Image (cartoon, rainbow, N blue to C red):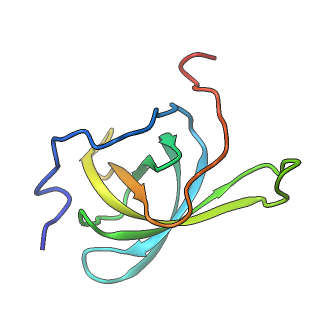
Amino acid sequence: MTFANDVTPNRERRRERRVSVHLPIVIRGLDFGGSHFEEPTSSENLCRGGVALAMRNPVELGHSLEIRIPVLPTAASSETVFSTRGRIVHWKQGKDADESIVGVEFTGPRFHRMYVSEETS
């Protein structure tokens, strides 16, 4: 078993442009001990294929998460929540000892909304 704080892949696997944007997110999964958790958080950046987000629950690389991102309805879709599953592919220490920044690759539906980077606005 590989724990997120033991190994972090060094290769860049991202094929799509990341957008630096902080969106509210709710994640659900299992922690190291196998206990279910639900955690509100926010994105650091995202692309169609994944998201980087801050979290406080200890998780493993390869671990699966449920991801829910509130979205505004559009002319093409009346949905107000984007829901998908993802797999943790990257881990780094966050701002403090209790926070991690994890990279999650979407394994369910991909994100098809457009956002302007907060770095350029």
On screen, residue 52 above or below 67 = above
The residue drawn where x is 46% and y is 34% is 18
Q: Position of residue 23 (x, y in %)?
A: 60, 44
Number of numbered tags placed on the structure image: 0
Left or right for 38, reference 64: right
Nearest the camera: 35 or 48? 48
Quarter of the rendering occupied by the C terminus? top right
Q: Residue furthest top?
A: 120
The residue drawn where x is 17% and y is 48% is 9
Quarter of the rendering occupied by the N terminus? bottom left
Nearest the camera: 50 or 25? 50
On screen, residue 120 above or below 46 = above
Left or right for 37, reference 67: left
Q: Position of residue 39 (x, y in %)?
A: 50, 64
Q: Quadrant of residue 117?
A: top right
The residue drawn where x is 56% and y is 38% is 22
Q: Residue furthest right?
A: 75
Q: Position of residue 81 (x, y in %)?
A: 71, 61
The residue drawn where x is 18% and y is 41% is 11
Q: Position of residue 40 (x, y in %)?
A: 55, 59
